[in-house]
C-alpha cells in the first residue's frame, strides 16, 4: 500500500464464501492484488452484511474479537484470528457524525467474517485499527444511503470506508449450483450485477435505492443484508470521484464477487 493520501477511497468488496479467507484461489489473489492499489489508511470503518441488527452500532473495543459467525466449515477456518486493534475514538467520531440519536457505541460485537475475511488479504499484518458499523434492519435503503453520506468526512481523515457484501446473494441458488457442480453464472445474476455496477458508476441513486423492490431484485437478494453495505460506499462518494470495478466475476455460480472502488 502507498502512503495515506489527502482523501481515502471508499471500497465495496464482494466477500462470498468464508473459505476465501484461507484458500489460495481467484478471489484471494484478486483481493491481494487490489491491496497493492490502495493507499494505507489510518483506520478502517467496516460495514459488513453479517452485522444486521436493530440499531446503528459502532464497535468500541480496544481489542475487537475475531467472530467466527458461520457453521460447517473446517477447523482451519475457525482457528483464524485477525488481531487488529480497535479505535474507540473513531467509534465516537462515527457516532458524532451520525448523531447520538441515530447511533451508539457498543462493546458487544467484534469483527465478523464479512470484515476479517476481506481484511486478511487487504491488510494482512492486522496493524491498522478497525471499527465495525452495524446495519440497522429497521431502516429504509434511503436512510442507509444518508448514513453513508454523513460518514463521507471520514475519508478526509485517513479512514477507509469498507462495505462488505455481494451484489448478488441468493444462497439457495448458490448452494444448489455448488452441489450440481454448475459454475456458470445464470442470466439473472449477470444482468443484476451489471445493472448494479452501471448504477454505481453513474451515481444513479434512484436505481440503487429501488433495486430490491422488483422481481429481479428479490431474486438477487432474498434478504437485503448483502446489498446494503454498497449504499454506505455510494453515499460516501464525492461528485468527482472515479468509480471502477477492480474485481469482477461470480463464485458458486451466482454470488457476484464484484468490488466497487470509489476514488
Image (tube, grey):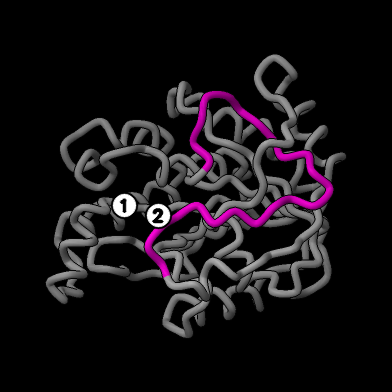
In the image, is residue 190 above or below residue 120? above
Nearer-the-camera pick, 220 or 20? 20
**Residue 166 numbered tag:** 2
Q: Which residue is mark 1?
A: 169
Nearer-the-camera pick, 233 or 80? 80
**Spatial separation of the CA atoms under disc 1 and disc 2:** 6 Å
Q: Main secondary structure of the magenta part?
A: loop
- Percent across and percent down for residue 125 are 75, 74
Does the segment drawn in magenta span residue 60?
A: yes
Q: Neighbour class for label 2 at 10 Å: few (<14), some, many (≥20)?
A: many
- Percent across and percent down for residue 19 are 44, 71
**Residue 215 numbered tag:** none
- Asked whether the beta carbons under mark 1 and mark 2 sit within 8 Å of each other, the answer is yes
In the image, is residue 212 above or below residue 184? above
Q: Quadrant of residue 17?
A: bottom left
Quadrant in which the C terminus appears: bottom right
Helix, strand, or loop for circle 1?
A: loop
Left or right, residue 262 beside residue 110: left
Outermost residue toward the top? 101
In the image, is residue 127 above or below residue 57? below
Nearer-the-camera pick, 245 or 20? 20
Q: Which residues are magenta?
A: 51-73
Amino acid at each position: 500500500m502507498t502512503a495515506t493520501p489527502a482523501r481515502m477511497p471508499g471500497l465495496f468488496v464482494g466477500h462470498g464464501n468464508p473459505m476465501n479467507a484461507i484458500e489460495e484461489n481467484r478471489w484471494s489473489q484478486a483481493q491481494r492484488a487490489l491491496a497493492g492499489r490502495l493507499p494505507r489508511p489510518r483506520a478502517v470503518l467496516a460495514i459488513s452484511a453479517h452485522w444486521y441488527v436493530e440499531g446503528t452500532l459502532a464497535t468500541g473495543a480496544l481489542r475487537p474479537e475475531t467472530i467466527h459467525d458461520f457453521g460447517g466449515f473446517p477447523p482451519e477456518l475457525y482457528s483464524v484470528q485477525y488481531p487488529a486493534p480497535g479505535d474507540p475514538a473513531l467509534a465516537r467520531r462515527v457516532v458524532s457524525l451520525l448523531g447520538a440519536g441515530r447511533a451508539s457505541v457498543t462493546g458487544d460485537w467484534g469483527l465478523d467474517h464479512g470484515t476479517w475475511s476481506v481484511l486478511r488479504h487487504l491488510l494482512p499484518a492486522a496493524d491498522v485499527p478497525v471499527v465495525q458499523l452495524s446495519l440497522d434492519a429497521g431502516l429504509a435503503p434511503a436512510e442507509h444511503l444518508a448514513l453513508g453520506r454523513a460518514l463521507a468526512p471520514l475519508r478526509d481523515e485517513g479512514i477507509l470506508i469498507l462495505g462488505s457484501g455481494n451484489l448478488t446473494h441468493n444462497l439457495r441458488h448458490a448452494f444448489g449450483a455448488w452441489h450440481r457442480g454448475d459454475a456458470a453464472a445464470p442470466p439473472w445474476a449477470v444482468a443484476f450485477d451489471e445493472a448494479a455496477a452501471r448504477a454505481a458508476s453513474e451515481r444513479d441513486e434512484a436505481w440503487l435505492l429501488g433495486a430490491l423492490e422488483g422481481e429481479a431484485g428479490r431474486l438477487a437478494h432474498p434478504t437485503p443484508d448483502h446489498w446494503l453495505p454498497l449504499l454506505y460506499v455510494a453515499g460516501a462518494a464525492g461528485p468527482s470521484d472515479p468509480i471502477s470495478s477492480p474485481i469482477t466475476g461470480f463464485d458458486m455460480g451466482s454470488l457476484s464477487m464484484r468490488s466497487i472502488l470509489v476514488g
